Image: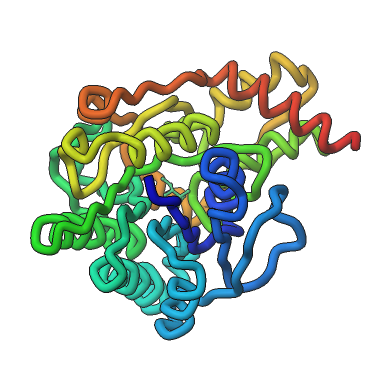
Amino acid sequence: MATEKILVVGSSGQIGTELVAELRTIFGASNVIASDLREPFSHGSDGPFEVLDILDHNRFTEVVKKHGVTQVYLLAALLSASAEKDHHFAWKLNMESLYTVLDAAIDFKFSKVFWPSSIAVFGPTTPRDLTPQYTVMEPNTIYGITKQVGERLCEYYYNKFKVDVRSIRYPGLIGWKSAPGGGTTDYAVHIYHAALKEKYYNCFLSANTKLPMLYMPDALRATISLMDAPAEKVKIRGSYNVAGISFSPKEIAENIQQYVPDFKMAYADSDPRQAIADSWPRSINDSEARADWGWHHKYDLDAMTKDMLENLQEAVTK
Ligand code: VAH
């Protein structure tokens, strides 16, 4: 079997940082090319890196040719909160990058492409509990709109050009190895750092704002499982619902207090991210992913909290 040469675009982000390390253990470090706007201080795993602005079409083509790229994971995007601050650039980055990669998939005959969607594709008119794969989708954030259009573009390129592009509607992702960047679910990462350092966190979402979340080890496993699945099992070519855990700030705070008894939580009011969170589902039905390619999450809230605190404690005291 020919060696896959995998390019990760946006490799320094929250997902990319961990996904590069995971892909390098599977495919070999030299076969996974990390790329982002600037060289990271350390990727935590050795291997090739290219400075790449995905909006620089010629530079992207140069990198693809230089490495003989056969697969692309496109992770560069403006997330929900940041996107609301500059919706024109959010549309440009999130959509032009996808078009560039999908067109390159035809030109360079990529074997596969991965593109992340999000539960942000759903909006305030979507049923909010156990949100199904197929339902009303009227996102009212520019980020969600780009993800909704992106899903249709992926399906179009699969049906019309046979591009094997695969996608997951990620919930909020939580991990200890990388920082989140400009999202509405970022609080669920910051809270663990704050619990250990300050034993206090002023949460920008209200206490009962329940959202779908996924621990990063589960998110990486879902991504690799989907990409590894035989093509005929990938029946959905827009993007798959994937679920893990759903909790509110109050619930995660109470879970942390089992391990950090003197941890205190406060709740800011009138943060613009509250309106974004209120437009999203509270929980997700991922039965299609479970049926089509055997998805199942492993971490519940308590297992995630235990793992997060143990690893962060080690990192903090290093
Ligand atoms: C965000 N972390 O908050 C991302 C994610 C479901 C949330 O798409 O924008």
Q: Is residue 263 left or right of residue 105?
A: right
x and y percentages locating residue 240 in the rendered image? 26, 39
Instruction: Looking at this view, name the residue that lies furthest to the top.
Output: 258
Observer able to see residue 291: yes
Q: Is residue 130 left or right of residue 15?
A: left
Instruction: Looking at this view, name the residue that lies furthest to the right.
Output: 318
Residue in the image at 56% along x and 66% along y: 35
Quadrant of res 152:
bottom left
- Quadrant placement of the C terminus: top right
Residue in the image at 90% along x and 34% along y: 317
Instruction: Looking at this view, name the residue that lies furthest to the left.
Output: 160
- Residue 219 versus residue 246 in the image, above or below: below
Q: Is residue 233 left or right of residue 279?
A: left
Observer able to see residue 268: no
Q: Nearer the viewer, residue 169 or 2?
A: 2
Quadrant of res 95:
bottom left
Q: Nearer the viewer, residue 317 or 70?
A: 70
Residue in the image at 31% along x and 53% along y: 112
- Quadrant placement of the N terminus: top left
x and y percentages locating residue 227 in the rendered image? 35, 41
x and y percentages locating residue 301 in the rendered image? 54, 21
- Residue 93 versus residue 288 in the image, above or below: below
Residue in the image at 44% along x and 25% along y: 245
Quadrant of res 96:
bottom left
x and y percentages locating residue 149 in the rendered image? 22, 62
